[in-house]
Amino acid sequence: MAYRLSPARAPGALLREARPLKALFNQAQRLAQLQRLVESQLQPAAREHCHVASWREGTLLLIVTDGHWATRLRYQQNRLQRQLQQTDVFSSLTRILFKVQPVAGVPRTGGHVMDISSKSAENIQATAEGISDPNLRAALERLASHGKGSKTPPAE
């Protein structure tokens, strides 16, 4: 007995007909609609940093890409909530929660990168040699080790 493949169907038809896929597709469409409504009330610069995660029982959960944008949005939270409550979809909105979730695949910087010239590093090292305080001297030597062409790696 040979296995016979069923004829291929268009992805859209498959999504509309298969029950689990249909529910998933409807949920994705609902979130896309909510996202458009939220974006219409956000400042243009904030739109790419804020995404709707869920909307249930009067609570809107927004995922924000970093703490900076979460803070900015929290300052605007009352205005945003009032504006969203004026729409039919969010008329029962009672609170907005923000959750910080960095974008996957974007490397986080470890802070400011020290990059000083070799001449500056020599001057800092010379200054460190004349310092009697051991803590200050060690700090200056660490700073001098960040000079371009330095042979010693910075101590942490």
Image (cartoon, grey):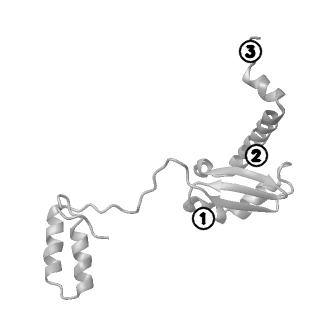
**Could you tell me how far apart the alpha carbons at marks 1 and 3 are, in whole angstroms?**
54 Å
Residue 124 in the image, given as x and y percentages of width and height: 18, 73
Q: Earlier in the sequence, mark 1 or mark 3?
A: 3
Q: Secondary structure at mark 3?
A: loop
Up/down of 46 relative to 153, above or below: above
Q: Quadrant of the C terminus?
A: bottom left
Residue at 77 percent of width and 55 percent of height? 83
Mark 1 packing: few (<14 Cα in 10 Å), some, or many (20+)? some
Q: Which residue is mark 2?
A: 34
Q: Which residue is mark 1?
A: 71
Residue at 23 percent of width and 62 percent of height? 116
Circles 1 and 3 in contact, beta carbons < 8 Å: no
Compared across the picture, whether 111 is left or right of 51 comes to left
Q: Earlier in the sequence, mark 1 or mark 2?
A: 2
Report the amino acid beneath label 2.
Leu
Circles 1 and 2 in contact, beta carbons < 8 Å: no
Mark 3 packing: few (<14 Cα in 10 Å), some, or many (20+)? few
Residue at 18 percent of width and 85 percent of height? 131
Q: Quadrant of the N terminus?
A: top right
**Could you tell me how far apart the alpha carbons at marks 3 and 2 are, in whole angstroms?**
39 Å
Up/down of 147 relative to 51, above or below: below
Report the amino acid beneath label 3.
Leu
Q: Secondary structure at mark 2?
A: helix
Compared across the picture, whether 156 is left or right of 42 comes to left
* Foreground residue among 44 and 52: 52
Residue 22 in the image, given as x and y percentages of width and height: 81, 33
Compared across the picture, whether 136 is left or right of 99 comes to left
Residue 148 in the image, given as x and y percentages of width and height: 20, 59
Which numbered disc, 1 or 3, marks the residue closer to the eye?
3
Report the amino acid beneath label 1.
Thr
**Could you tell me how far apart the alpha carbons at marks 1 and 2 are, in whole angstroms?**
21 Å
